[in-house]
Image: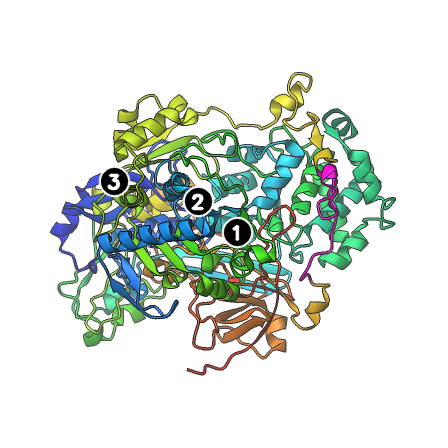
Amino acid sequence: MKDSNNSTKEKQSKLRNDIVTSSCPHDCGGRCVLNVHVHEGKIVRIESDNGEEPQIRACLRGRAYRQRVYAPDRLKFPLKRQGTRGDGRFKRISWHEALDIIASKLKRIKEKYGSSAILYIGYAGSIGCLLHNKRAVARLLNIFGGFTATWGSASAEGSHFSSKITYGTSYTGNSRDDLINSRLIILWGFNPAATIQTLNTNLNISKAKEKGAKIISVDPRFTDSAATFAHKWIPIKPGTDVAMLLAMAYVIINEHLLDQKFLDTYTIGFDRFKEYILGSEDGIIKTPEWAEAITGVAAINIEDLAREYANSKPAALKMGFAPGRTAYGEQAHRAAAVLAAMTGNIGIKGGNAAGHGWVPIGFIQRNGQFPGLPEGNNPIKEKIHISKLWDAVLKGRAGGYPADIKLLYVTNANPLNQFPNINKGVRAFNKLNFIVTHEQFMTATARYSDIVLPINTHLERNDIIRPWGFGAYYIYQKRVIDSLYESKSDLDICCELATRLGIDNYSDKSEDEWLRELFRLSEDISRDVSNYDTFREKGLHKIKVDKPIITFQRQIKDPENHPFPTPSGKIEIYSQQLANLNNPRLPPIPKYIKPWEGSNDTLANKYPLQLITTHFRSRTHSIFDNIKWLKQVEPHAIWINVADAKERGIKNGDSVLVFNDRGSLTIRVKVTERIMPSVVCIPEGAWFKPNKQGVDKGGSPNILFKDEHSPCGAFCSNTCLVQVAEHFQEE
Amino acid sequence: MQWGFYFDQTRCIGCHTCVIACNDWHDIEEASANWRIIKCVERGKFPNIFVAYLSNSCNHCSVPSCALACPVGAITKRSEDGIVVVNRETCLGRGDCKTLCKKACPYDAPRFAEDVDAKMQKCDLCLSRLKENKEPICVEACPMRALDAGPLDELERKHGKKRDAEGFAYSIKLKPSIIFKSK
């Protein structure tokens, strides 16, 4: 790239470039239009949607994509480890040699230990596209005999689980353009200003506010969403959301504000819930005073919010995924849905079922799978939760896990950085026989691998992509430039590995043939888009939707003929499915369960600060942490309240040490009134860079987190106790 | 005629999309040279806090203090649209004139890359795009539709006449060409 010294002539010529439509494929909350300008085979600029409304405008990350494609640290060639794992010494090898090594390791491990010794971690680096994603390697390994797979989502397992139990589906949301019909919007642990959260969410919240909706933010931080949209901010201790929601239920019951007709018609089990709230089950009445002691929210604020919510129909209680990313976080999402039912805010304009929030448009998940490259069948059925992978590698069958893992295959993921307890992860990596990673950059995971293969970016390949959450459009991601350096796609690599593994049925199609086939097989896309070739040329296909989509409208208007997709056909406040589990950690009605590493844990005497990890606007998880334009936006820093900083002699901009028994990191500090006392926040996704003593100078918070998931399988990335201290630079 | 900007501060989420879109369109590498800047205003005590963002670039003042300060006349105000432009061929560069234009501007609009002979650069309202009837890239990029650009009288008819905002003080002397919906 050049400085703006470019002559006017060159700039003029840049206006007449070829413009090719694509979209980001990352797991960020958006899936926006990139109109990429190409001049003589090189990307020179990126514009976004400036066509018909609603426009799908890219965020800063999409706008910065040119720097990611041409980043000087792009991986260019296959690499083989030279030094010890993690020390970063690699040598360039040929594709031929790299693939030979991988094939022979796969064969040897399978022969000696069986296919379950192969652990495959494919995740969300490229997601939502039909062809180029984690499935390429899954397909190869399945044909090869299977692998130990992972389960659990780092994102939203808590809210998925709750919605499936309560409503029978994750499709519980009204489309975002319905927000303007709400009188009250509660943003609960929801900060779309940092994450987009699907098409025009922020714009629609702004429009709702301009139309007169009252907006309240419940969050440990005064987020940018709170700052921009909220009339009122209610700070709450992390992991205690369920206690506040239960106390709100108490107020609504106690003051007779509930919609009994709605509960009688559409739900089952409210009486059991009511008994629990009124204390007949455990002797504890779930009053606002009870909740105040747990949540740090004054009882009067809980009462006011309960009354306001019950009296402001239609009201949208919009749960972010964050409350569910805590110990027993699924209980908060279950309780929120009960509140939506108690106030009759389900299936109506301006309401919100307070569920996972997908809207049945843009993509439809079938049988738990998004249509795409067929993975085939994995004969190995036992999976390991993503929070427990490192423990499983270290302990194996002797520790109760389903396999003795010897070989790790990673694509579209940076698990060492992004899964909890990095130090345990390093020990696990060091125990493994062989690690291969497909990557675009030298991430922490790549650095600890034995072979690293360079992968092209989505701008160097063709694909078809769906909206991230929902939205009435699809994008054909047309190849913009040829693959840079020696990079290849996961699919190309797997084709070559298949030959070496003696597999002849991996792929009989070219990229275009695959896309035509997957287009045909995708029931939503082939329904909405008439012609593949026109779509391929046009790039962006918007579906006309004339009014907001109100989920569960039919169930509410005509319950006789339209049951909810639950076993009982009703909204399940009490779930027999959960009762059958007979697991006190997953009760049939939503309950407060004292979490580990909460503020009232005895460990808080030693580590008094609750750490939360939030999304950062200049990264998509661990992607983009090396991009110059984005690094300028905001320094990676820990937020700490002014009082907590003062107590520790810490000043804004200082470098601090954050630690607990699992690890430590150093990071710049932002001293601010925007976070509640006793809570600190480190944005996730910074790149793990340990010094010789094992202190992470990159500030990746996962070095501090316990490798434990909530009972439903949710990732507890907001449950952690730490201490923060002044840090004197030793280097 | 005088062209200028409109900024709706009540909508801005501080996302920086305008900044990165500008950097990409105009090939700006270094933060010190960014034409557009986001400023964050924070005040108050927990839990009563006020936060506002201000997205600002060159305001194409009626009386451009940068042009008056330039020792070689490299900065001029176009008569047809009032857009203030810099001739980078004649600009002396940061080493030779000690960034007199930058020092004269209360809005930090004249920008310099870090190298010693970097020439001044700043927002030109995307003149090349205006010629093709396109909006400035920042306006087209803003996911919140918080920015607008056009002839100032038209902007006033559309958006009102408010001349200041959180983090922005209107200079009566320079008359910056920007109107606001302030927070």
Q: Is residue A178 above or below residue A649?
A: above
Q: Give me the C-alpha separation between circle 2 and circle 3.
A: 29 Å
- Disc 2 and disc 3 in contact, CB within 8 angstroms: no
Give the residue type that dot 1 points to: Ala
Residue placed furthest toward the top: A561
- Disc 1 and disc 3 in contact, CB within 8 angstroms: no
* In the image, residue B31 lies in the stretch drawn in magenta: no
Chain for disc number 2? B
| Element carrying mark 2 | loop
Q: Which range of residues does the magenta coloring cover? A: A578-598
Between A473 and A511, the residue placed more toward the observer is A511
Task: From the image, tell me which residue sits under label 2.
Answer: B144
Q: Are marks 1 and 3 on the same chain?
A: yes
Which residue corresponds to the image point at 60% horizontal and 47% vertical from the top-left?
A713
Q: Earlier in the sequence, mark 1 or mark 3?
A: 1
Which residue corresponds to the image point at 52% horizontal and 54% vertical from the top-left?
A224
Q: Position of residue B78 (x, y in %)?
A: 21, 53
Which residue corresponds to the image point at 59% horizontal and 54% vertical from the top-left?
A716
Chain for disc number 1? A
